[in-house]
Amino acid sequence: MKILAIETSCDETAVSVLESKNDLPYPEFKVLGNTLLSQIETHRPYGGVFPALAKREHIKNIIPILASTLKQCEAGKIQTHKLSTEQKNIIEEILLREPDLFQNFVKFIESTPKPDIDHLSVTNGPGLEPALWVGINVAKALSVAWNLPLTPVNHLEGHIASVLLSKRPCRPIFPAIALLISGGHTELILVENWGKYKKIGATKDDAVGEAFDKVARMLELPYPGGPEISKLAKNARETGQESSFSFPRPMMHTPDLNFSFSGLKTAVMYEIKKIPVLTDKIKNEIALEFEDAVCEVLLHKTKKALEEFGAQSFISAGGVTANTHLREKLLSIDSEAVCIPETELSTDNAQMIAVAGAISILQNRNIPNIKDIVAQGVMPLDTSKV
Ligand code: KG4
Ligand code: ZN
């Protein structure tokens, strides 16, 4: 089965085509085409992702990215693909609010051989709704143009499923515990099987990536702050510099599996206020202690979850998994299988949406009518209450 996936939930415009082989629970994937464009440079001056700008950039880039991905795949057999009047009318209605995108879409479809693809998938949440809609509408238009089924995908399931793409072969044994750590989420999920998820812990306030980004701003570091803090902390570790700061480990010893990062962020802010000049040395020390505090809490609660649920394996996913120090700590967890995808698979991408889409298809989950696929800014990954 060949599947084309689109991801536009935040500030990455991404399209991938993957071929899946073998059946569940461990399908294998070959990447046939993959293009990703990050909008980081566009959002950097604002210190965070600006939804209206994200939407504008997705609209500008989605067709070229689609075209680039298809060029990497073997061309399809149908050389020209003129749209019927009926197809054009439906697509025009789907892209009603974006007449330029409609024109570009029709031009693209009518000049591109229909690719050899069986399914489409698209992220429909959680994320920034204006951004999500761009990917969803283009996916719907492709579904009409190529007459292919379209499967909506929960972005968080995509992050979990990304472990199947890891170069270090990783086959999670269920029940598994997944730690989802990104700019918008900090959750512990019990994965009873693909498609069977139960949220067992979450942040009470800021997401961990958000805390990294906010502390980075306090240290006058550019957006996104996670990698910047990580660099400073690494500097300190490599030069044997110890931190003279001592930040709290919030909720470390509470009996539940929840987190809180807002107090930690405030503690950093109060310390910074006391400092007349933020030298590089002081910045390194703050970054080191902050990163240590975050990693200790995440590691402690993850181990607690693994024990409490007798989980056989551990999955870490989401942008913060790109943090080198945290990865080292998480890789040391004693479990049958520790699944941590490579850095480029940890941050947002469309390959993971193709994998989650393939899992959904292999499980024969309901494929909704395209009219019923809508963007959902908030979209919990918890099937236990359904
Ligand atoms: O999963 P992701 O790419 O997008 C969301 O769905 O949010 O995660 C982005 C988050 C940002 O907050 C970013 O600062 C953080 O991941 N991040 C990191 C690192 N690389 C990215 N945090 C800590 N250390 C890193 N190396
Ligand atoms: Zn994400």
Image (tube, rainbow, N blue to C red):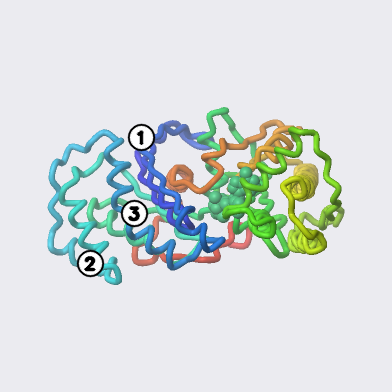
Q: Mark 2 vs ligand 2: CB under 8 Å?
A: no
Q: On the rendered image, what quadrant is the C terminus found in?
A: bottom right
Pointer 3 with pointer 2, Cβ within 8 A: no
Task: Name the amino acid type tagged 2.
Answer: Glu
Task: Specify the farthest residue to the front.
Answer: 277
Residue positioned 72% across, 42% down in the render? 233
Q: Nearer the viewer, residue 124 or 48?
A: 48
Report the disc number at residue 51: none
The residue labelled by disc 2 is 92
Q: Which of 305 and 218 is in front in this view?
A: 218
The answer to which quarter of the image holds residue 170 is: top right
The residue labelled by disc 1 is 32
Residue positioned 20% across, 61% down in the render? 103
Is any part of residue 186 visible from this angle?
no
Residue positioned 43% across, 56% down in the render? 8
Answer with left or right where residue 74 lies relative to residue 125.
left
Task: Name the amino acid type tagged 3.
Answer: Asn
Q: On the rendered image, what quadrant is the N terminus found in?
A: top left
Task: Please tell me how crowded label 2 is: few (under 14), some (14-19), or many (20+) other residues with Cα within 10 Å.
Answer: some
The residue labelled by disc 3 is 61
Q: Nearer the viewer, mark 3 or mark 1?
A: 3
Q: Nearer the N terminus, badge 3 or badge 1?
A: 1
Task: Name the amino acid type tagged 1.
Answer: Leu
User: Is disc 2 placed on a helix, strand or loop?
Assistant: helix
Where is residue 385 shown, x and y percent of the image?
62, 62
